Amino acid sequence: PPDPAPPAPRSATQALATPAPAPRAFPRGPWGRPRATDRRPGCISSTSCPAPTFSSARCPAVSRPRSKNTSSAGIGIGFYGNSETSDGVSQLSSALLHANHTLSTIDHLVLETVERLGEAVRTELTTLEEVFTQRTELVAATRGARRQAETVAQQLQGLAFWQGVPLSPLQVAEDVSFVEEYRWLAYVLLLLLELLVCLFTLLGLAKQSKWLVIVMTVMSLVVLVLSWGSLGLEAATALGLSDFCSSPDTYVLNLTQEETGLGSDILNYYFLCNQAVSNPFQQRLTLSQRALANIHSQLQGLEREAVPQFPSAQKSLLSLEETLNVTEGNFHQLVALLHCRSLHKDYGTALRGLCEDALEGLLFLLLFSLLSAGALATALCSLPRAWALFPPSDDYDDTDDDDPFNPQESKRFVQWQSSI
C-alpha cells in the first residue's frame, strides 16, 4: 500500500501561537509518597515506577507492636503476681481463723469445766454432806473433795487468757479477706482493661481506623494513669512489707501486747516457742492435775466406805464420777491446746503467707505496672504519628491497576487525550 501523506508543515507563526501542554501535576500522599493510583509520564502501570522509600516512617509502625507485645507480657506477669498475692493473703486469713478456733476452744472448755465443777459442788457434794451427817470422817472427806473442786475451778479460770481481749483474730481475718477480695477484683479488671486496649489498638492499626486509634489513645492514657498509681501503691506496700518481714517477731510482740494487754511471758511463749521460754501455765496445770487426782481418790474412798452404810449416796457419787471424768477429758484437751505448738504453727503460716507468697506477688505486680507504664507511654508517643501514615478513604482502590476497564484508567486516558 502507498505510504500515508506526511502532515502539512506549520508555519512559525502557528507554532508560536499554539501553547505547549502543561505538565500534569500528580497529587501526593502522606509523607510525600505518590499515591498508588497515580501515574507518571512514561509509566504503563503503578508498579513500573518504584516509589521512593522512607525508612523513618516505619519507626512508629515497628515501635507500636513492640510496645503492645511488652504490655502483653506484663499482663501475664500481672496475672501471676495477682494470684500469688491472693494465695499469700489466703494463708494469712486461714492462719488467723485457725488461731481463733484454738483460742475459742480454750475459752469454751474452761467455761464448761468450771460450770460443771460448780454445779457438782452446789448439788452432789452438798447432798453427800447432808447424808453423811452422822459420820464425821465421811463429812470431812466430802468437804475435802469440795475444796479440791473449788481449787480446780479457780486454777482453770486462769487458763482462759484470751477471754475479754478486745482483739479478735476472727474480725482481723474477715477484714483482711474483705480487703483482699476487692483488691483482687480491681487488679483483674485493670489487667482485662489493659488487655482489651492492646487488642483494639492492634486492630485499629491493622485496619488503619483513625477513630479506633483515637479512642484507644484516650483509653491508653487512662490505663497509664492507673498503672502509675498502682505502681506507687505497690512500691510502698512492698517496701513496708519487706521492712516488716526483716524482723517480724519484735513488731508483732509489741503490737499484740499493746492491743491485748497480755503479759510478755505469755506472748513470748507462743511467738517464740523454744526451750528458753517456759510455759506460763505450767504451775496452774500442775495444781489442777493434783487436785483432780485427790478428788478421784477421795471419791473412790467414799464409794468403798459409805455406799454399804448409806445406799442413797450412790447416785450422787456416780454423778460426781461422771463429772470428774468429763473434767479430766477437758483438762487433757486444755493441756494440748495450751501448748505453744498449735498457735506458733499458725503464726509461722501467717508469716510465710505474707513474707513469701504475698511479697513475691507484690514484686511481680510491681514489675507488671512498670512494664505496663513503659509500654503505654511508648504507645502514646507513637500513636499520634501513626495517624499521618493512614491514607484517606478515597485513596483505596480494590480494582486492578492493569485492568483496561478500570474507571480511573479510563479517566486518565481521557485526560491524556485532551492534553494532546
Image (cartoon, helix red, strand yellow):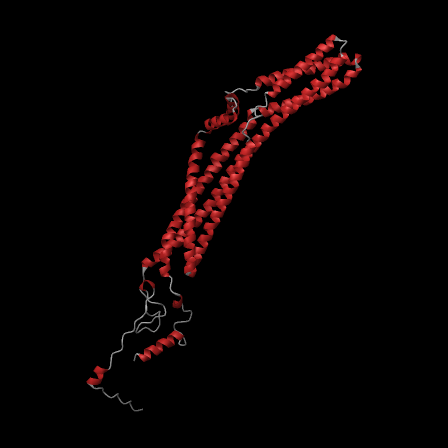
The N terminus, quarter of image: bottom left
Q: Can residue 229 be seen here?
A: yes
- Is residue 285 shown above or below 222? above
User: Can residue 367 be seen in this snapshot?
Assistant: no
Please provide percent x and percent y for residue 325.
69, 21
- For the C terminus, the quadrant is bottom left
Residue 161, how many percent across, how many down? 57, 23
Viewer-nearest residue: 65 or 195: 195
Outermost top residue: 136
Name above or below for residue 248 compared with residue 287.
below
The answer to whether residue 239 is left or right of residue 92 is: left
Q: Disc count in the image?
A: 0
Q: Look at 47% across and 53% down and name the residue there.
A: 196
For residue 151, above or below residue 75: above
Q: Residue at x 73, y 10 (%)?
A: 138
Up-down relation of residue 246 to residue 159 (above or below): below
* Position of residue 75 measured from the top left corner of the image (x, y, whole percent): 45, 47
Location of residue 51 in the rendering, given as x and y in whole percent from the top left corner = 32, 66
For this orientation, the residue located farthest to the bottom is 2
